[in-house]
Amino acid sequence: MTDVLTFLDALPQEIVITDPDIVASYSRDQSRFTDSAVPAAVLAPRTTAEVSACMAAAQRDSVVVIPRGAGSGLSGAANASAGSVVLSLHRMTAIREIDPVNRLAVVEPGVVTADLRARAAAEGLFYPPDPGSVAFSTVGGNVATNAGGMCCVKYGVTGDFVLGLEVVLADGRIMRTGRRTVKGVAGYDLTHLLVGSEGTLGVITEITVRLLPAPREAHTLVASFPTLESAGLAVSEIAASGSTPSMLEILDRTTVQAVDRMTKMGIGEDTAALVLVQSDDVDAASVLAGIEAVCSGVGAVEVVVSSDPTEAALLLEARRSALRALEALGDWLLDDVAVPRSRITDLIAFVESTAAELGLIIGVFGHAGDGNLHPTIIYDESDESSKAAAVAAFDAITRRALELGGTITGEHGVGRLKSSWLAVEHDETSMSVQRAVKAALDPAGILNPGVGGFAARA
Amino acid sequence: MTDVLTFLDALPQEIVITDPDIVASYSRDQSRFTDSAVPAAVLAPRTTAEVSACMAAAQRDSVVVIPRGAGSGLSGAANASAGSVVLSLHRMTAIREIDPVNRLAVVEPGVVTADLRARAAAEGLFYPPDPGSVAFSTVGGNVATNAGGMCCVKYGVTGDFVLGLEVVLADGRIMRTGRRTVKGVAGYDLTHLLVGSEGTLGVITEITVRLLPAPREAHTLVASFPTLESAGLAVSEIAASGSTPSMLEILDRTTVQAVDRMTKMGIGEDTAALVLVQSDDVDAASVLAGIEAVCSGVGAVEVVVSSDPTEAALLLEARRSALRALEALGDWLLDDVAVPRSRITDLIAFVESTAAELGLIIGVFGHAGDGNLHPTIIYDESDESSKAAAVAAFDAITRRALELGGTITGEHGVGRLKSSWLAVEHDETSMSVQRAVKAALDPAGILNPGVGGFAARA
């Protein structure tokens, strides 16, 4: 390896951070069970030109670069390795443009997603992507991981809103992809090749996103079910009914009870699952009336519907506090799998039996409408056998999702957490094409090696 | 070049077509001003395994392969070259699966798009893509070109519905991309790298598409405007108003008059532009009432609204007959550019002045809601100066679209028609990355060389 200090010396010193405490805080994201190390330094460029200078120097000096948004990822895609530098985009926070007529925004990668949503809302517009981290994750990070959220069931994922990008390649060259028009088919879709590529193909320095008209205030429904099967049936029937809820979430018994212990909401012990639905359609009241009938028809114990935003916030409290409630039970390892909607109950039932078998608590909550669930394994970090059981459960659940026709990751990404899983989901030809694409864009392998299941630097 | 006859001899003879008349009919698509030649043969495989055998043999024998759907393209992406073979997917027409609960379909590439739409409709489902060629073009061709249509303003383009693909690579290897779940972020998005790649990266042998619930019967509005500016203002105001029409089309004066001459609809000479709108929202009547007010407010001469499907069909007749009406005036060269919605009138005004300057008739119609317009140049194929003027107008319009912040192609693709334009729209780094991607997937350059603006075989 080249002397990283020489590399750093050649950069503008105002963008180089070497303070050991700060540098150490950039070692990893929010994932568990992923490798990381304190990087050699953090680079905090302010402009595309500075990002380009960083990458050109890194390529020349063979320095590994880990691009980073807010570090809120759950798969280790922003974890540093020894001798690497973390390239943090947190100083590039300008919202460069909001265009109401063409309904688009142009932003720098470090813009916090909630800030973009607020700015759009101020213009009567809507930027739908709402990952759980919306209040602190960045648009650049969301694009790099193709982040999801609760809106996806109606509005789609982050990538569905990306029209174009400015990207700095591994060798420092600057490239524009995509366009400002809503339609366009000129050339290969490099935009969506970059979306979700987890910092392995380039550093995103500007994002042009499509905006929607502001949605109506949503109506909310919460239904409790006596069995997992009845809740699953409700989700399937809602999906098949042709209605288009703007949210369709599920919480299993373990999660509901954890929430109840924490919040004292008084959800009965006999609740096997909660299903939460929102509709922002103009006829939301009648949409939810139809969904209420579906829920009652399959045996829901209680169904509460509200058009009042304050009441809705209370109704959604169980979903919002799910991860916090499970966290209170111990250390946690969050999985993120997606299955065809019709297989959700199969997956949840498998998780429950796995938990019983391995003597673990595993709560399941997530985006039922997309088949995207987050089994959350509670374990004891200080107990090696508990850790081993957690990993065994994680592996079993991920494998089961694949067997059910699903994917190893619905929205959190492959990162380092699931890099060994990529070749289980994808066939050998796909893996070889992905490796060829990686080699075409980053021949020296300096961008986030070890992430995404591609060969690290030789 | 290898002896193509030796290559053909090695293939199962029941998939090799050498009848000269049939082979000649596969020379080109529906584009004008594009190079083509009679291919050496047509291959008509029935299975993925046969496609794989064709490609493996072609790679071994260095035979150029031109993948082809229905041949209805308008950019020359399916044009044959001398010594090439056309690989036609017309025998792979199975709709393998319609899954109402998970709302997806799995089809072979040769399925006619209208057939998929009909099969989905029979299950109460909706496959939105509706290119003008919907009655005869294929899903595989639509995916390979990322085809658009009138639905896109609300529902998006073909690529927005593609969940996964089976693809045969240039060397015959078979690859699966994507997934059956609505969400998934495992690995690079090879699915959308293939979408719109015009047969230059692989041969698509199976497509998994997302379906929607069946839409409501649409309400229809047609407004006539005394000036182009007022029509453009209406489109901008509709776009900015936050309503979500399921169709938003425009016809300029030249097109309207051509339609009127052919159909005797009695559209007045004083109509400078027609704007056609549909809404399939549950509150379509009130949506169109709002749009009617917008149109009247900016000076529409006449606004007709109908909720009756038969009447709606009559109202839309002008749009449906636009190309046919312009065709009746002479030979035609159809452009396909997209600009930000706010620049539509700038582009149409430029087309009108270009037509006057060059002494040509140029009608403009298209998807105003997307900023995607089809200036249609009428010329005389037998007159060299008229041909030269047509090409000059085409080039001027395409350049102007770029100057207005647009793209050289909104939905028809680059093909051979605009291969020299790709490097005008995209920067050098993007072109070099696209070439690197092409080389990574098709190192021998046997798939559709000359299409898409990438280097042909050396």
Image (tube, coloured by chain):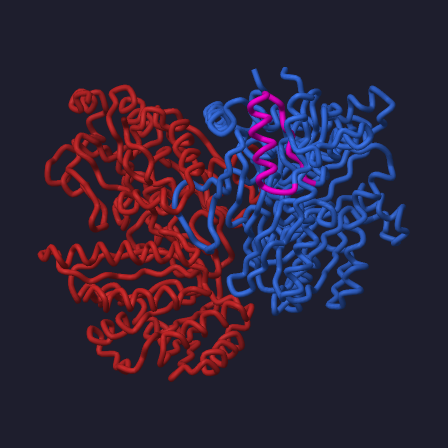
Chain colours: A red, B blue
Nearer-the-camera pick, B103 or A200: B103
Magenta segment includes B62? yes
- Image coordinates of residue A244 in percent, x first then y, are 52, 66
A348 left or right of B231 in image: left
Q: Is residue B368 magenta?
A: no
Q: Position of residue A88 (x, y in %)?
A: 26, 38
What's the residue at 61%, 69% (across, down)?
A: B282
A394 relative to B142 in the view: left or right: left
Which image quadrant: the N terminus of chain B? top right
On screen, residue B331 versus residue A236, left or right, reads: right
Residue B402 visible in image:
no
Residue A436 position within the rendered picture, expressed as x and y whole percent measured from the top left = 41, 30
Range of magenta residues: B46-69
| Vertical comparison of B95 with B218: above or below | above
Q: Is residue B337 visible?
A: yes
The vertical placement of A448 against B392, above or below, is below
- In the figure, A37 relative to A357: above or below? above
Looking at the rendering, which quadrant does residue B205 occupy? top right
Residue closer to the observer: A291 or B441: B441
Kindly identify the residue that appears in the image at 21 percent across and 29 percent down. Answer: A14
